[in-house]
Image: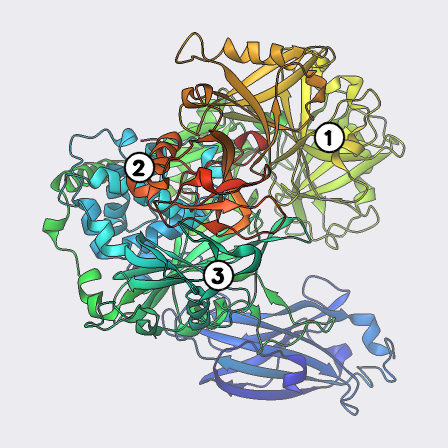
Amino acid sequence: MSYEIMPELGYEIEEFNYNTWHIKNWQHLDKSITGPEFEVGGWKWRILLFPFGNNNQDTVSIYLDFVDPKGAPAGWHSCVQFALVLCNSEDPTQFIWHQTHHRFTAEESDWGFTRFYELNKLFYPCENRTRAIIENYSANITAIVRVFKDPTGVLWHNFINYDSKKVTGYVGLKNQGATGYLNSLLQSLYCITSFRKAVYQIPTEDDELIESVPLALQRVFHNLQTSNITVCTTELTKSFGWNSFDTLIYRDVQEFNRVLQDNLETKMKGTKADGALTKLFAGKMKSYIKCINVDYESSRVENYYDIQLNVKGCKTLRDSFKDYIQEEILEGDNKYQTVGYGLQVAKKRIVFESFPPVLHLQLKRFKYDIQKGAIVKINDRFEYPMEIDLEEFLSKDADKSNSHKYLLHGVLVHSGDLHKGHYFALLKPEKDGKWFKFDDDRVIPVTENEVLEYNYGGKNPNNNPNKIGHTLIKHTNAYVLIYIRESNINEVLSPLVSEDVPSHLCKRRLKELISLLEIKKNLTVKVVTTEKFRNHQGFDLANFDDRQYPLSDVQTYSILKSETYGDFKENISLDFNIPSEQIRLWILVNRQNKTIRPDSPIPESCFDIGMEVIHKKFTSRQNEMMLYMEVAEKPIDDKTWFPEENDHKMIFLKYFDPNKQAFAGLGHLYVHDSEKVSDYTHVFCEKMGLPPDTPLKIYEEIKSTMIEKMNLESTFQQLEIQNGDIICLQKDLSEEEYIYTFLYSIILLKHYIYIYIFFFRIREYISSGRFATHLCTDPLRLRFTSAFSTSDTPKSIIKRTTALILSEMLQTANLRPSTHILFYEVLDVELETKKFFKVAWLGSTIREEEIIDIYLQKNAIISDLKEEILKKVSLSSPNSRIRLFEVHHNKINKDYSGTEPIESIQEFATLYAEEIPMDEIVANQYDRIIQICHFKEDPISLHGIPFKFIIKNGEKLIDTKVRLRQRLGMSENDFSKVKISIMPGTLYARPEYLYDENIIISEIKLSSKDYLGLDYVDSIGQVERIRGSEAIYIRN
């Protein structure tokens, strides 16, 4: 039976047992009773029963209870999966069960089900049962228990007071919003100690921190070495030239790795670290084409820093390597163009000349789906080993004198999909050490099974199907594999010595620690008053630390930790001129749903206790203390100012005024557990200043993304209302529905984000201008942009019409999330008479230099648009001309001559403008202008900015490359990785690569639709920023 009701969890079972407790005289049982003790996993357990409910008389409550929590060793825990079965004592086929799992500790020594089953239903047959569960006031309860082994020590840990450094020897990195990819990469590079040493060798003593990437990276690495707490990466991202908005953008970890290493490689030139990255990460591969029918061969050898391997169609890592070096026959329409022999049938292949000491393998988890017309994630199962010998994939002429056995060192894992996901790293920092999971601010030990099986992806064959009968697909899987050659591992992971660390880093760190010790003498205490709550426009009672929104200006104190509660309260009394006996201070705690609410008052018995002791006792997980100041207007009796009964709860009330589009905090109110919400509606109306019979809509504010309508006929106990819960009130305006709407204002020139939170009538016409009035602007100057539901990023501009209503803008008919997002801009001109364009101006190289905003009368033509562009850019010559073109899916879709009306430009068109190159202006009749596009391996996966390029008559490819590199603005090292091909204009045609540098492109017969393709990784990161996505860049 245990396997039927308790699913396999995949952990090794230490011991299994069960125990049945026969219960008689149910009607005369005490409020809580325990069953007989039984032993599992070396510890004694029992069933804990509340026959008439645990603080709830409607249900039976049953728990599994650890017998002796006080006698347990320090730090004791036991990982248990268990089921509790309540059955008819004479007929065990009539039963009810629930199962769960829990990490039992001395602090959490019982676990189970407060609402196990409705009490009244146990006394008669129901829900397809032929007999009652409780007959003759008797029943059986069986506990079925599995105790699991916990080799890592953190299985099902709640991580309260968890110390990463103490448990693992490593500390985590703070996530700045969407920097999980950055944290995972930094931890993986940090654990390669030879890389860390190379970074330390870059001279940075005289650098400015905010402008020096090497110095900021050295600081991160040094802090990871020396700190006992989570390390911040803000200095590093600022050195990239990023602002807070950049840290909220989701990026690809491997693409960022290339950009970072390119930057570091440049900074290492001429230093002791020069060439270190090439030595560590660079291997060589040879691409060759050999004709079958003629004696012709073309080949080239190039460096690589990572290998991109197919996941689709490959079951294992070895399969992917075999696929990568698979020989391909170029025939039919795909014949190879040779010099002197024309089109020929040829063999094409890639072979490896060498593998580097540290090998990065990127698994191609993302691919363009032709049918869906979008890039999708491939979650197929893909197995990789702890060690692999790669010698079989080397060329015949490669040096094989040393072993090519590689050991798995790290796995960068991606969880989620293309638009929204999370990265974490699984790393083995020492050759014979343990594996750890680096997940932002937390580092935990993991097993080899978690490194391998958990991240293969696909349908886990060991998993049971879900209730619908489908085996669930795992969306968490390996994305980057890091292997180290076994013969180099001692060198690559060699320990650091003090001489490896620049002395100026140690001096900086010492100064910071001294300053930190001074700060640690004090405790920060923030106090929320009723007045501050009354004016708060947002969630909770106040906003303490969410910098996406305006922070609340609450009273803040920096006090000595030794100061007593009595002294602190007296100072509060003096500051606010309120007698101390009329003040009660409530502790605000961080709830699990990420809200901050009052939990319990500080007892007066703490009068002579230090504030640090109180802080550790009540809010040990918080760096600072947050309090709510309750003020009593009049005493309850001669000695008592505040209610003490446990059956009362202190709740907070918010009133939303739809006319003012604003909240008003109405203060707090005590409610009785057993009373209904409807018993208080007249009180609510009174506090809102409304007649007592005014119909209201009443909601509970559960968290920032969830409000729930309250059942007026339920009691506060049934609704599980606790101290500090917030109830939102609103006058019921017939059937018109109100929703939370987030309106994000992006001021592009200043890179600031302002966020407003509103209720709007779902059927309200946006043209009413009420939102414009709130912003003190003309409604005709407002422009709205919708958002992707998966990533909350801008999607498309909402076309303005006079009859547009909010529900149409939000598309609420098909999607009803708890929050809705709109982006808005306040434009400089009225939208009714003007048309707005964003044009990306390209410099002398194919890189966006700036985005130009232009407003034109709707009857203007393209020439007028060009004239406006010329007013905002500088040209190399007074006689220069500019070109305006439209790009669609990274290909030039249309060239504009100048006579076309601007109305011919589609609303969401991506526009580029550039100065026409001089060699194109002076071209002769035999030269040819061709389009050039960028892609990586698959021509469908285009990237970057396409451009026009002159093919000179009679020019060899080797000379064409020189001009092409200059036009792209790429270094020789970067350009060496670019493969040039002829791309037929027909759909899904394969590229014809040009390996022979003596070939003359002008002699190749090309159709008007053919173009040149540049095959390389988009390390420059030129993507369509004006369409909402962001390039990866490091400015400094």
Residue 202 left/right relative to 29: left
Q: Is residue 755 visible?
A: no
* Helix, strand or loop for disc 1: strand
Residue 311 x %, y %: 51, 64
Pointer 3 or 2: first along the chain: 3
For badge 2, the amino acid type reads: Ser
Q: State the separation of the CA atoms marked 2 and 1.
A: 53 Å
Q: Which mark is residue 759?
A: 1
Q: Tell me where residue 485 sits by quadrant.
A: bottom left
Q: Which mark is residue 346?
A: none
Residue 897 x %, y %: 61, 18
Q: Nearer the viewer, mark 1 or mark 3?
A: 3
For badge 1, the amino acid type reads: Phe
Residue pictured at 23% horizontal, 28% vertical? 208
* Residues marked 2 and 1 touching at CB (< 8 Å): no
Residue pictured at 53% horizontal, 67% vertical? 457
Q: Is residue 114 above or below residue 865?
A: below
Residue pictured at 63% horizontal, 45% vertical? 790
Residue with the mark numbered 2? 971
* Residues marked 3 and 2 touching at CB (< 8 Å): no
Viewer-proximal residue, 339 or 124?
Answer: 339
Residue 727 x %, y %: 70, 39
Residue with the mark numbered 3? 345
Residue 91 x %, y %: 79, 91
